[in-house]
Amino acid sequence: MVDLPNAELDAMIEAEKKQVAFEYHNEAWADGMSDGIGTDILAETAISTALVELVRLHGEDKAISVVDELRRRLEHGEFRVERSLH
């Protein structure tokens, strides 16, 4: 058995949960596309749903913080399809 520090184990668990969530979202996205829902509508409703939940669970300040962080990442090109990881 591998003995990992709690923080490292927590990070691994969070990464796994993010991967599973990503797969769920991809499946829902594909289902929506196959039903004829456009990408703009899917994207806007996904973002809106996420923000409603963040506000409900953590308040508007947390939601604004998340939006600010996403904006920073967007401006730095993190979401570009052609971006390179090297």
Image (tube, rainbow, N blue to C red):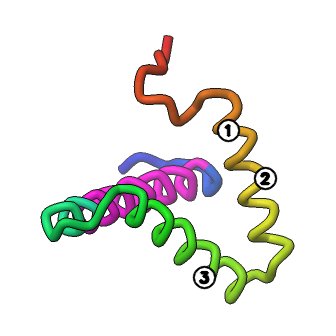
Q: For this view, does 26 lie left or right of residue 73?
A: left
Q: Which residue is identified by label 1? A: 73
Which three-letter amino acid code belongs to the residue tagged 3?
Answer: Glu
Which three-letter amino acid code belongs to the residue tagged 2?
Answer: Asp
The answer to whether 70 is drawn above or below residue 74 in the figure is below
User: Where residue 81 sits in the image (x, y, percent)?
Assistant: 41, 29
Give the magenta-colored segment's residue range: 8-28
Look at the numbered discs 1 and 2 and tell me whether their residues touch, using CB distance below 8 Å.
no
SS at badge 1: helix
User: Where residue 45 sits in the image (x, y, percent)?
Assistant: 47, 72
User: Where residue 77 sits in the image (x, y, percent)?
Assistant: 60, 28
Foreground of the two, 5 or 80: 80
Foreground of the two, 78 or 14: 78
**Majority secondary structure of the magenta segment?**
helix
Label 3 and label 1: CA atoms lie apart by 21 Å
Label 3 and label 2: CA atoms lie apart by 17 Å
Q: Which residue is identified by label 3? A: 53
Q: Residue 68 bears which disc, if any?
A: 2
How many neighbours does mark 3 have within 10 angstroms: few (below 14), some (14-19), or many (20 or more)?
few
Q: Is residue 18 magenta?
A: yes
Label 1 and label 2: CA atoms lie apart by 9 Å
